[in-house]
Image (spheres, rainbow, N blue to C red):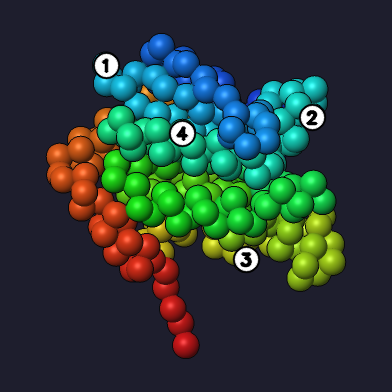
Amino acid sequence: MPLNISQRVDILKSLGRPTIRDYIPLLFTEFTELHGDRYFADDPAIIGGIAFFNGSPITIISQVRARDIEGLVKINYSMPHPEGYRKALRLAKQAEKFRRPLICFIDTPGAYCGVGAEERGQGEAIARNLQEFMMLKIPIMSIVLGEGGSGGALAIGVCDELAMLENALYSVISPKGFASILWKDGAREREAAGLMKITAEDLQAFGICDHIVAEPEGGAASDIALTASNIAAWLTGALGRLSAGDFDELPEKRYQKFRKMGVIKE
């Protein structure tokens, strides 16, 4: 039985929800993490590197979640700084240079909006990623593991195929941010989530989500291996579809994909 929106919000906020650190050893082999943006610093809220998937080299970029408070503090509660997005772009460009497919894992409530992040160009870093990812001549696959909030998620969400885990949410603003702006009460985030149409089913109907990856009953935490197997099945199919054509044609196809998104009512 599908979970309601409040149950999904609770699952995504649970510290037991699997993170990219859980999925990497189940999905990939020989993962080598690469660090730094070559401008300012290394942002632990975004990890990336090179690995093998089904025996072929790929590049991974992912936002990071943690399973305890100490880990959450280290990764700034999964809210990346601009250096995180610049690291992501550096790795994406490296992937294009060596013709490696790019797999992005989205899992953030949003980009960090602190003074330091703004001083170092948070908005510019996100905007540049949107522009540059659109033009990459390699297959790009993105999957929303949990929360996909605001521009912080969109910065690694420009792709050829987008999947979402069954209980994931993907939105232009986090439900808490929506509630804080509309009602001046962040505690009403579950009510806001119900109004925003941000579930995997909603976004598939809007033409934004291409595939919904099933989770076991009770959520991904109840059987991480099964969830990883379902992700791997989607990745295998997506890679097969995207690698069959001419990589030089991918930017135009990606552009047309985004032009067709959404539902307009007057």
Q: Earlier in the sequence, mark 1 or mark 2?
A: 1
Q: Which residue is mark 4?
A: 91
Mark 4 in CB contact with mark 1 (< 8 angstroms): no
Badge 4 marks a residue whose secondary structure is: helix
Image-quadrant location for residue 181: bottom right
Q: Residue at x 72, y 48 (%)?
A: 120
Badge 3 marks a residue whose secondary structure is: helix
Q: Residue at x 26, y 59 (%)?
A: 252
**Three-letter residue code for mark 1:** Gly
Examine the rendered structure and indicate whether residue 219 appears above or below residue 257. above
Badge 2 marks a residue whose secondary structure is: helix
Q: Earlier in the sequence, mark 4 or mark 1?
A: 1
Examine the rendered structure and indicate whether residue 17 appears above or below residue 156. above
Q: Which mark is residue 195?
A: 3
Spatial CA distance of label 2 from label 4 is: 25 Å
- Which of pointers 4 and 1 indicates the residue nearer the eye? 4
How packed mark 3 is, by other alpha carbons closer than 10 Å (few <14, some 14-19, many 20 or more), is few
Q: Nearer the viewer, residue 85 or 216?
A: 85
The residue positioned farthest toward the front in the image shown: 39
Q: Nearer the viewer, residue 17 or 256?
A: 256
Q: Earlier in the sequence, mark 3 or mark 1?
A: 1
Q: Which residue is mark 1?
A: 55
Q: Which residue is mark 2?
A: 73
How packed mark 4 is, by other alpha carbons closer than 10 Å (few <14, some 14-19, many 20 or more), is many
